[in-house]
Image (cartoon, grey):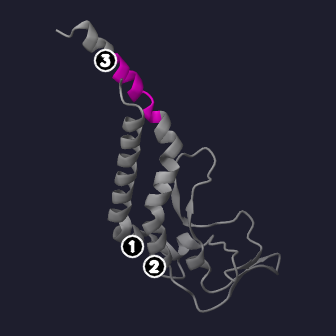
Amino acid sequence: MIDAQARIEIAKISKKLDGIPALLREDRKKILSYAAIPLADAAQRNAPTGTKIHRTYSGGKVVGTYHPGNLKKSGKILTKLKKSPDVFVGPEVLRSGSGTFGKGKRVNAYYAHMVEYGTVHSSARPFMRPALSSAGGQVMKRMENGFRLLVKKYITNNSVK
């Protein structure tokens, strides 16, 4: 049977452990962003680079010019998605597709899924799936280490006294 002192200690520990979810919410994106770096790097390395300039049209007028290397440059770790505690890795897609892309810093890879899976007119040239296969182990190790350090930090700062 548990004595009164042990019950008090268990209650203290339980109350301290209740703080872990809040801590995870605060630092989750930092850890996931750090863990996603190898995946983003592998996706950028694997992304094919075209040889021609491509254009998009609206009403017969050119609205977008896409230079070779646009897809490769568009790889990002996306953390600022509203209402999501998660981190995503993939090509950046803009809401409006007008302008010049791939030359300088501005990118828009709205067509990434067509490259990854292919279309009726072109065969698939996967770059994200192979990136996940090659970098998945590193991502998992980084996540594991990050969350382990976070829990250790929490335990150190909130030891039961």
Is residue 65 rendered to the left or right of residue 161? right
* Residue found at the very far bottom of the displayed protein: 51
Residue 56, position as x, y percentages in the image: 72, 79
Q: Nearer the viewer, mark 2 or mark 3?
A: 3
User: What secondary structure is found at the residue carrying circle 1?
Assistant: helix
Q: Is residue 13 magenta?
A: yes
Frontmost residue, 61 versus 29: 29
Q: Which mark is residue 46?
A: 2
**Whether residue 27 is visible:** yes
Q: Which residues are magenta?
A: 10-21
Residue underneath mark 1: 130
The local crowd at label 3, few if under 14, some if 14 to 19, many if 20 or more residues have their Cα within 10 Å, is: few
User: How far apart are the two marked residues, 1 and 3, measured between alpha carbons?
Assistant: 50 Å
Task: Tell me, yes or no, whether the two marked residues, 2 and 1, touch with CB atoms within 8 Å.
Answer: yes
Residue 99, position as x, y percentages in the image: 78, 76
Is residue 113 rendered to the left or right of residue 64? left
The local crowd at label 2, few if under 14, some if 14 to 19, many if 20 or more residues have their Cα within 10 Å, is: some
Mark with earlier residue (1, 3): 3
The local crowd at label 1, few if under 14, some if 14 to 19, many if 20 or more residues have their Cα within 10 Å, is: some
- Kind of residue at disc 3: Glu
User: What secondary structure is found at the residue carrying circle 2?
Assistant: helix
User: How far apart are the two marked residues, 2 and 1, measured between alpha carbons?
Assistant: 8 Å
